[in-house]
Image (cartoon, grey):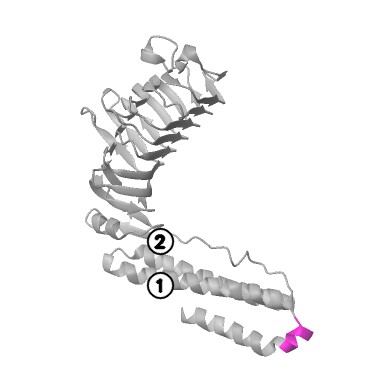
Amino acid sequence: MKKLLAVLLSLTMAFSLAAPALAVDFDFGEIQDAVGNVKDDASDAVDSAKDVFDNIKGDDALETVNSIFTLAKKLAKAIHTLVHTLADIFDFDCPFCDPTAEEEVVVVLPATPETLADVLASAKEGEVVSLTAGEYETITLGTLNGVTIAAEDGAKVDKFVTTAETAVSNVTIKGFSLEIAGETRDCGLLIDAAAVIDNLVIEDTTFTGPATYKSCAGIFGNNPNATLTVKNCTFDGTGYAIWSVAKDGFAALTFDGCTFNNIYSWVILVQYGFLGDLTINGCTFTACEDGISKNGAFAADKTFTFTNNVVADDCAGHDGKDSKWFELKTANAVVTGNTLAEVEWIPGAAQGIKSL
């Protein structure tokens, strides 16, 4: 850090004292080399701060390391701005990007099974809570805003649970492998009807079931005000990928880029009270007994979107008895770019998409 400050001060003083001479006899290559060295020193400082941060596990050291990391970022930005200012003064092309552009610096908070509750409680918007190797059993989501919960190798979680006390906004759960047992309505993610859930994203996560039990689900529950996105996830051997029960559904539910394999009942089953838009895009379905079902009709102003999906020829259809894949009624359906058994597919009433 002292080296970085010395370089910054030396560069500033050199330009301040030599500016009149430089205006007459200016070596562009030398200045390019100088500013390049400054940028390298700034990058080294940031990398060093990251290395220190990654090696710190104790909660008591996190605040200190975060402060060092922030200082390094500010120094790097100051040097970056100085280089651009000098480029403007002496009219040469700066080799770096726009100094006004904010470079995202992600703060990673390592957690263990013993420290997870405290780390989650202290996590701030934009930070990543990284679960190191260990047995975490069931994780109950509390109050979180703009936080990512990510898994490192060896982090084992049984399931994620929301309760009436849960309040999450723009939260991402990423990179987990959740194994679901055979008990009735067991799941990898439990949604409570009274939780406050505003944009909960489940990403790059695998939900694996016992492959023989229809009453388990990757995601189970309901919440009429919740917005939920499931992105690049895999569901394998579950009764349902998602099973929304009772009289409430979700305000919005999206599956994007997911893989569904060996699903032994409906892949996506939402019940009468589902209130929102349902979007399924870029997903792959293989060996699935049934497709998408919405008990009761969609509200007139809500849209069912089924786009760019691939359905294999080993998917049985509705109840495994006929060629249907859907069981839903909607006034607004966007169904394009799909294939069934590798052939372009435009499903309609014969496959279970019914008009209101």
| Rendered location of residue 266, percent (x, y) | 35, 22
Extreme front residue here?
A: 300
Q: Residue at x 40, y 72 (%)?
A: 68
Q: Amino acid at mark 1?
A: Ile
| Rendered location of residue 144, percent (x, y) | 32, 53
The main secondary structure of the magenta stretch is helix
Q: Residue at x 68, y 77 (%)?
A: 31
| Rendered location of residue 39, percent (x, y) | 58, 71
Which circle marks residue 68 in the picture?
1
- Look at the image and say whether residue 137 sits in the magenta stretch: no
Please, is residue 110 above or below residue 175 in the view?
Answer: below
Q: Secondary structure at mark 1?
A: helix
Give the crowd class for mark 1: few <14, some 14-19, many >=20 residues within 10 Å: many
| Rendered location of residue 150, percent (x, y) | 36, 50
Extreme bottom residue here?
A: 17
Query: Closest to the observer: 47 or 141?
Result: 141
Visible residue check, residue 45: no
Extreme top residue here?
A: 321
Q: Is residue 224 left or right of residue 102?
A: left
Q: Which residue is mark 2?
A: 107
Magenta segment, which residues? 20-26
Q: Is residue 308 left or right of residue 210?
A: right
Contact (Cβ within 8 Å) of mark 1 with mark 2: no
Q: Which image quadrant is residue 246 in?
A: top left
Query: Closest to the observer: 287 or 251?
Result: 251
Q: Secondary structure at mark 2?
A: loop
In whole angstroms, how far apart are the C-alphas of marks 1 and 2?
A: 12 Å
Please, is residue 63 above or below residue 320 in the view?
Answer: below
Which circle marks residue 189 in the picture?
none
